[in-house]
Image (spheres, rainbow, N blue to C red):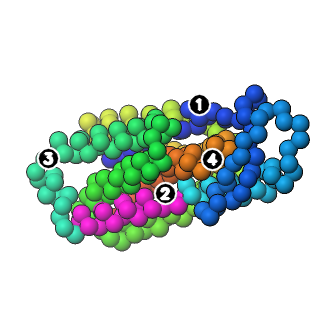
Amino acid sequence: MTFGQQPQGGNQYSNPNMQGQPQYQYAQQNPYGQPQYGYAPNGTAAMNAQAAYSYEQVQQAQRVSVTRAYGEMTIGLLITAAVAVIAQMTGAYIGFLQATGLIGVFLFAAIQIGMAVYLGARIMKITSGTARVMFYVYAALMGFTLSSIFMIYDLGSIGLALGMTALFFFVLTMFGMTTKMNMLKAGPILMVALIVLIISQLILAIIPGVSGMTQIVCALGLIIFAGMTMYDAQQTRALFAAYEAQGPEMIKKISIVCALNLYLDFVNMFLYLLQLFGNRD
């Protein structure tokens, strides 16, 4: 099952450093590489030149923050892979399906979608620790569900799709981070395309057997999530730039929601590549 995502772009998050709001000064670097902040009221005539942010410090802080998001995404992927392998080796997923049938499948899907929506909507209200635990639990549930691919595809196909996904994801991320093209403007288009993709998959589930349509939908899905990967790469950088002045706790929260978006891009691209090029066992 493919899980989509809501772009968490400019509509949900706004830049808190607008005119008339308090400005922050750089105080010192804590042991974890995150900046600490001192308060300076708006309209201060002269800021201490050594205390204020320099361009290099701002760039370094953004790089550290982006690295944190991709690190959290990587941990989530490792949890998913580990749970999928364990569930396959122990037969846990097969036993779960035998006990619950389709009810269990829909229950797992509902829980995963609900967690993703809740995490995106409540990220500003919950603590960073709670957000991280929810993300890891989500990744574990995804791994339990994805253990089903071992019953459909051979290991060679799974490994090939995983390698291709990692390569594409890296290339698309680097392109999104370095290009001057503003992918954030493509957010509404990608969202509409994602809705059309989901509706198309539901129709194919109800009316199976349409020759060639599954491959076409998978190809379109791959293109859409390639665009989402570039979009989320730029959005990650933009969100950290907007919220970096609110301190380490906010940075941790933003890193989790960005990691979730990137994680979903990776998993969906992997599934589409597997369906396109995998050999069914």
Percent x, y of residue 144: 28, 57
The reply to whether residue 60 is visible in this rendering is: yes
Towards the viewer: 58 or 235: 58
* Alpha carbons under labels 2 and 1: distance apart: 23 Å
Q: Nearer the viewer, mark 4 or mark 3?
A: 4
Q: Residue furthest left?
A: 99
Q: Secondary structure at mark 1?
A: loop
Percent x, y of residue 189: 57, 34
Q: Is residue 77 magenta?
A: yes
Q: Secondary structure at mark 4?
A: loop
Q: Which residues are magenta?
A: 70-88
What residue sits right under mark 4 in the picture? 247
Q: Residue furthest right?
A: 46
Q: Nearer the viewer, mark 1 or mark 3?
A: 1
Q: Nearer the viewer, mark 2 or mark 4?
A: 4
Q: Secondary structure at mark 3?
A: loop
What residue sits right under mark 1 in the picture? 11
* Alpha carbons under labels 2 and 4: distance apart: 21 Å
Q: Is residue 114 magenta?
A: no
The reply to whether residue 218 is visible in this rendering is: no
Amino acid type of the residue tagged 4 in the rendering: Gly
Q: Are marks 2 and 4 in contact (CB under 8 Å)?
A: no
Q: Earlier in the sequence, mark 4 or mark 3?
A: 3
What residue sits right under mark 2 in the picture? 73
Magenta stretch, main secondary structure, is helix
Direction from residue 239 to residue 27 in the image, left or right: right
* Alpha carbons under labels 2 and 3: distance apart: 31 Å
Mark 4 residue crowding within 10 angstroms, few (<14) / some (14–19) / many (20+): some
Amino acid type of the residue tagged 3 in the rendering: Gly
Q: Quadrant of the C terminus?
A: bottom left
Q: Earlier in the sequence, mark 2 or mark 3?
A: 2
What residue sits right under mark 3 in the picture? 101
